[in-house]
Image: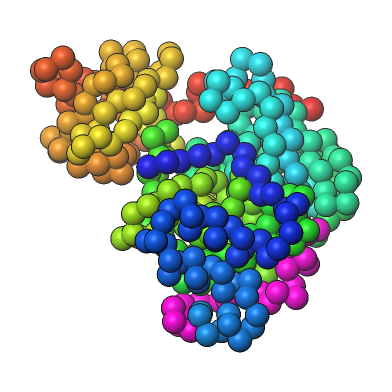
Amino acid sequence: MLITHHFGRRNTARAGPAPARRAQGWARLAGPGLVSLVALSAALAATPPARAELLAQTPPRAGAPQAAGSGDLARFNASIVRIESEIVPDGRTVEALGARRIGTGVILDARTVLTIGYLVVEAEQVTVVTADGHRAPGSLAGYDHATGFGLVRTVVPLPGAALELGDSDRVAERQKVLTLGHGEPRATEILVLSRKPFSGNWEYLLERPIFTFPPVNNWSGAALIDGEGRLVGIGSLVVNDAAGGHPGVPGNLFVPVNLLKPILSDLLAQGRRGGPTQPWLGLATEQVRGNLIVARVTRDGPAEAAGLEAGDVIVGVADGRVSDQADFYRRVWKLGPAGVTVPLRVLKGGDVREVQVRSIDRAELLRKPKGI
């Protein structure tokens, strides 16, 4: 699976209806298998009669809120900000994500901005730029590895409009939604393709993320807005298999905001979720021909300390056999919170070995920001 989270941008300078233009481009890249999906996304930019006719062929689930009308596409601009982050020089994430990061954030209140966590994790300085160009210094207020969310607090109140949190559990397949990133004149109408599970090789699993089509380039921290004008997701990734049961369909992944609601007060009060955290092993895995291969291990992490190396094959956790990456994470996390010893069965050099990995809280290895 192709997965990208390096701060994408939409190109809004070109003329023509953006949704239709993007759909045509992806059709050329992905081939005839996307014809029906491309036609549907093109309908979002079509005249009202053509749009209604095409969308009638793929109705959303009954009761699902629909996207706001096209006349409302610019009314969310005051809630969207640009995030500029400078990361501590010795940050663990600098090699993969860079020392300077730019993306989008969404105003939750006068001094709180929600974004995707990889934009601000290990940040020593954050600048928030509003739609009218106002620049406000801020700092990382909270980060949650399990969901991927990050919170920024500004020193002074922001001259913008807060966007209310919606109910992401109600977002359904075939539903029209809006997405908006920083620097864009108006929101773009897109389509929800699936709510299937997603696993990332950085020990990350979402059971019901929101996959959308056509893919947009300015996804990092972008807002996903439902038909009631409420925030239901935060942009995280661009992927090449967004549709359930249809391989090879590109799209974006948004993290549902209902995952934020139970931990929001903890993130603001103490910078992290309260209570026990998931065990973290410090290894990245890839699924190759039915085998879960160790792609790399984190320097000074638990997996490295236990002797795991790139190329090792994870066969099982405790007495259970691992079927795929998501199954691996679920089995590890069921053993207990961070600090639990994880018994792995690993194919190493032609032999299956028992390897004991003492997990940690991932936050223990992250560099702490100095603030503003």
79 drawn magenta: yes
Residue 307 sits in quarter: top left
- Residue 118 falls left or right of residue 88: left
Residue 69 sits in quarter: bottom right
Q: Quadrant of the C terminus?
A: top right
- Residue 290 falls left or right of residue 175: left
240 drawn magenta: no
**Residue 359 seen in the current view:** no
Q: Which residues are magenta?
A: 56-80
- Looking at the picture, the colour scheme in use is rainbow
Q: Main secondary structure of the magenta part?
A: loop
The foreground one among 15 and 237 is: 15
The residue located at (62%, 39%) in the rendering is 7
The residue located at (34%, 13%) in the rendering is 305
Residue 355 locus on image (x, y percent): 21, 20
- Residue 353 falls left or right of residue 197: left
Residue 68 sits in quarter: bottom right
Residue 106 locus on image (x, y percent): 70, 52
Residue extending farthest left: 351
Q: Quadrant of the N terminus?
A: top left
**As drawn, 276 above or below 350:** below
Residue 225 locus on image (x, y percent): 63, 64
Residue 354 locus on image (x, y percent): 16, 21
The residue located at (43%, 53%) in the rendering is 30
Task: Count numbered badges in the picture.
Answer: 0
**As drawn, 246 above or below 292:** below
The residue located at (48%, 58%) in the rendering is 27
**Residue 198 seen in the current view:** yes
